[in-house]
C-alpha cells in the first residue's frame, strides 16, 4: 500500500475537516513520499527521539518513510526554521532522510476506535455514547456502564493495571467502597468537559491534565475525577492504530519505542 493510499483510507475514517479550529491535523512534513510503499512508525508525539528512531530503523535496513503521530508537530505557524530548534531539526531530518510526518489529533479523538473509544473498550464499558456528540453518533469522550458495577477501589486498580500510569490521581474525598456503575472517559486533556460529564450522570470520570480547582469542582458536583496522565490515556490508541494499519496489510508498521511521557515522579 502506498503512503497516499494509506492516508486516503485514514482520512475517510477520521476526516481532518472535523478537527477543531485551533488544531493542525494532517501533513506536518511531506518530503515527497506519497508514491512510496508505506512503512510506518506510529507514535503519540512526533519528537526528535522518534525521528532518530525512524532513521536508525532505516540504517538497519527497514526503510521507514512515515511517522504517523497523534499530536501535531506544528500547532501554530513558526516564525523561523533554524538549526538547533526542535521543529527546524525535524524538518531538516525529514527531508534529508525522506521521512514524512502526519498527525491525526482532534479528528482521531472523535471516531470509533479513536482515543476515547479505546479507553472505553479497555474498561469494558457497555452502552457507550459520546460525552459531547459531534456528527453521525461520533464525538468527544465516551460515557457508558460497567456491568457488573464495581467499587471505586476496584475501578482504580483496573485503571492502574491496564493503563500503567506512573502516578494515578483521584478525588481525595471519594469513598473507595462507593459502587460505580456509570463512567466517562476522555484521553488527554479533558478537564474542560467536566460540566458535560456531570450532565451524563457519570459517577467517575477518567481523563488527564486536571488542575487543583478542577478536582474541587468535581467534588462539589458529586463526580469522582481520576487523572491517569496524558501519556497513559492516549498511548493505547496509538497501539490500536498499529493494529488497524496491520489489518490494511501495510508493508511494515510498528509502535514507537521512543515515545516520551515528558514527566518523572519521585516516589
Image (cartoon, grey):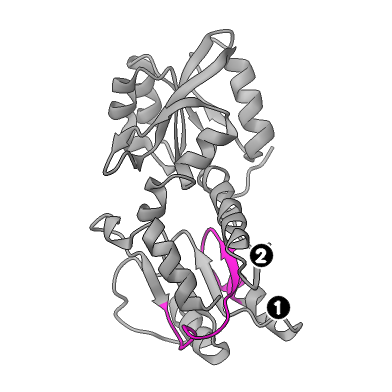
Q: Tell me if I can see residue 211 in this picture.
A: no
Q: Is residue 3 above or below residue 42?
A: below
Q: Position of residue 58 (x, y in %)?
A: 68, 83
The residue closer to the viewer here, 199 or 76, is 199
CA gap, disc 1 to disc 2? 11 Å
Q: Position of residue 152 (x, y in %)?
A: 57, 16
Q: Residue at x 34, y 26 (%)?
A: 197
Tell me which label, 1 or 2, sits earlier in the chain.
1
The numbered disc on residue 125 is none
Q: Position of residue 254 (x, y in %)?
A: 66, 65
Q: Position of residue 181 (x, y in %)?
A: 49, 14
Q: Looking at the rendering, which quadrant does residue 251 occupy?
A: bottom right
Looking at the figure, which quarter contains the N terminus?
bottom right
How many other residues sit within 10 Å of disc 1, few (<14), some (14-19) or many (≥20)?
some
Q: Is residue 21 left or right of residue 59?
A: left
| Disc 2, SS | strand
Q: Looking at the rendering, which quadrant does residue 167 occupy?
A: top right
Q: Residue at x 49, y 70 (%)?
A: 6
Q: Which residue is mark 1?
A: 57
Q: Which residue is mark 2?
A: 254
Q: Which residues are magenta?
A: 29-51
Looking at the figure, which quarter contains the C terminus?
top right
The residue closer to the viewer here, 257 or 266, is 257
Q: Tell me if I can see residue 187 in this picture.
A: yes
Q: Tags 1 and 2 in contact by the CB under 8 Å rule?
A: yes
Amino acid at each position: 500500500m502506498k503512503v497516499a493510499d494509506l492516508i486516503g483510507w485514514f482520512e475517510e475514517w477520521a476526516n481532518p475537516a472535523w478537527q477543531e479550529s485551533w488544531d493542525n491535523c494532517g501533513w506536518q512534513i511531506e518530503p515527497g513520499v506519497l508514491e512510496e510503499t508505506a512503512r510506518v512508525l506510529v507514535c503519540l508525539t512526533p519528537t526528535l527521539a522518534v525521528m532518530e528512531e525512524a532513521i536508525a530503523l532505516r540504517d538497519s535496513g527497514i526503510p521507514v518513510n512515515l511517522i504517523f503521530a497523534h499530536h501535531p508537530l506544528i500547532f501554530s505557524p513558526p516564525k523561523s526554521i533554524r538549526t538547533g530548534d526542535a521543529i527546524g531539526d525535524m524538518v531538516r531530518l525529514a527531508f534529508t532522510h525522506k521521512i514524512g510526518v502526519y498527525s491525526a489529533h482532534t479528528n482521531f479523538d472523535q471516531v470509533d476506535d479513536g482515543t476515547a473509544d479505546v479507553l472505553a473498550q479497555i474498561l469494558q464499558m457497555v452502552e457507550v455514547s459520546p460525552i459531547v456528540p459531534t456528527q453521525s453518533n461520533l464525538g468527544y469522550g465516551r460515557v457508558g456502564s460497567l456491568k457488573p458495577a464495581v467499587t471505586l477501589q476496584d475501578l482504580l486498580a483496573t485503571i492502574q493495571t491496564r493503563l500503567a500510569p506512573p502516578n494515578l490521581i483521584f478525588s481525595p474525598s471519594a469513598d473507595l467502597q462507593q459502587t460505580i456503575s456509570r463512567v466517562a472517559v476522555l484521553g488527554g486533556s479533558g478537564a474542560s468537559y467536566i460540566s458535560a460529564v456531570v450532565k451524563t450522570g457519570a459517577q467517575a470520570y477518567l481523563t488527564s491534565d486536571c488542575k487543583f480547582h478542577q478536582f474541587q469542582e468535581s467534588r462539589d458536583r458529586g463526580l469522582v475525577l481520576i487523572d491517569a496522565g496524558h501519556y497513559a490515556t492516549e498511548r493505547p490508541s496509538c497501539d490500536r492504530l498499529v493494529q488497524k494499519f496491520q489489518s490494511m496489510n501495510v508493508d511494515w508498521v510498528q509502535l514507537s519505542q521512543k515515545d516520551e511521557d515528558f514527566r518523572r515522579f519521585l516516589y
